[in-house]
Image (tube, rainbow, N blue to C red):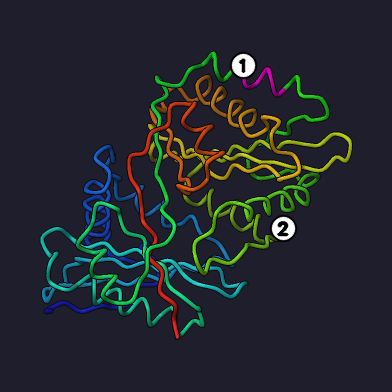
Amino acid sequence: MDVTVEPLTHPDALSAEDQRAYAAVLNAAWSAWNPDHVPWTVAAALARARVHAPPSVVRYLVARDPDGSLVGVGQLHWRDDAPGGCVARIFVAPSHRGRGIARAVGARLVEVGRRAGRTGVTAEVADRDAGLARVLERHGFRRDLPIELNAVSMTEIDGDLLRRWAARGEATPGYSLVAYDAPAPEGLIEALVAVRHVMNTAPLREGEPEEHYTVGELRAFEAAVAAAEQDWWAVAARHDATGELVGLSELYLPRLEPHLALQGDTGVHPDHRGRGLGAWMKAVNHLRLATERPEVRVVHTWNAATNAPMLRINRDLGYRTVLTLRSWYRPLG
């Protein structure tokens, strides 16, 4: 292999030429994985890399040709406030595949994770990339949780269905909704931090720790989303008898990708499921999206392939799977 692998603090630190190469490498991979991928501009690719805040940690590696050209990118992510594993993604320019670059970047990422004290590493690989899957198996990785990228065209969403879900929710006794645009109001911040822990009941990858949020983390993440030039709409379900928030649903709108909306976390506390609260919250945000952001053509959301209740809601809305990323896990000694 005639390339070098070196650390990178953040893609924003790259030269303008390298930033163009960085965006091209990522676009080539995502276009191969997802035929519906709309290539990111350089600015949009860089903005997406800003959606991280402590205790979330991201480490980057880049691979360079002998002439200095950027031909590969590695990312490693973990939460620094909890023991557990880390998640890796590797991207290689099409012109340089088959030369061992992914293997070299992957080995370096494993060492980064080991030095950071992580107990395992998860590699995310498109299910259709059988070659890389075989490489991972040879290096001691085992198949783990599949994650689906699901998408729906706004023209395919049944508005009458959304209105029925919203009306059913409004008629559900004992519950109401709280909606806001980030940043979260001070009077709600503690309750919003508490309800985020409901996401620990969703399927987790092997070695993935439960997340324990703080007000400081939520504020830092709000700042990161703003730095990434995204708007953030949130809806929470409130149990009126106790005043507790028992569910949430979030929608992100990247201003540098005006055709797209990103459905984030949606979850309901187990004690309050079976009442249509998840569908109610999603209906409110999707109805607002159709009214206030007519330029949005597509909504994306990531779901664990084993999360049957949320997949059922998404399928009813018209979401279809455009990409499956398979998690491959390996313990780190």
Measured as percent of width and height from the top left, residue 157 is found at: 45, 21
Residue 144 is a magenta residue: no
Q: CA distance from mark 1 to mark 2?
A: 35 Å
In the displayed structure, 195 sits above or below 240; it is below
Tell which tag, 1 or 2, sits nearer the viewer: 1
Cβ atoms under marks 1 and 2 closer than 8 Å: no
In the displayed structure, 136 sits above or below 91; it is below
Q: In the image, what residue occupies the spot 41% across and 39% down?
A: 150
Q: In this orientation, which residue lies closer to the viewer: 196 or 168?
A: 168
* Residue type of the residue flagged with mark 1: Arg
Is 201 placed left or right of 79 in the picture? right
Choose the circle earlier in sequence order: 1 or 2. 1
Q: Which residues are magenta?
A: 163-169
Q: In the image, what residue occupies the spot 46% across and 41% down?
A: 301
Q: Quadrant of residue 221?
A: bottom right
Secondary structure at badge 2 equals helix
Q: In the image, what residue occupies the spot 30% across and 45% down?
A: 40
Residue 165 is a magenta residue: yes
Q: Which residue is mark 1?
A: 164
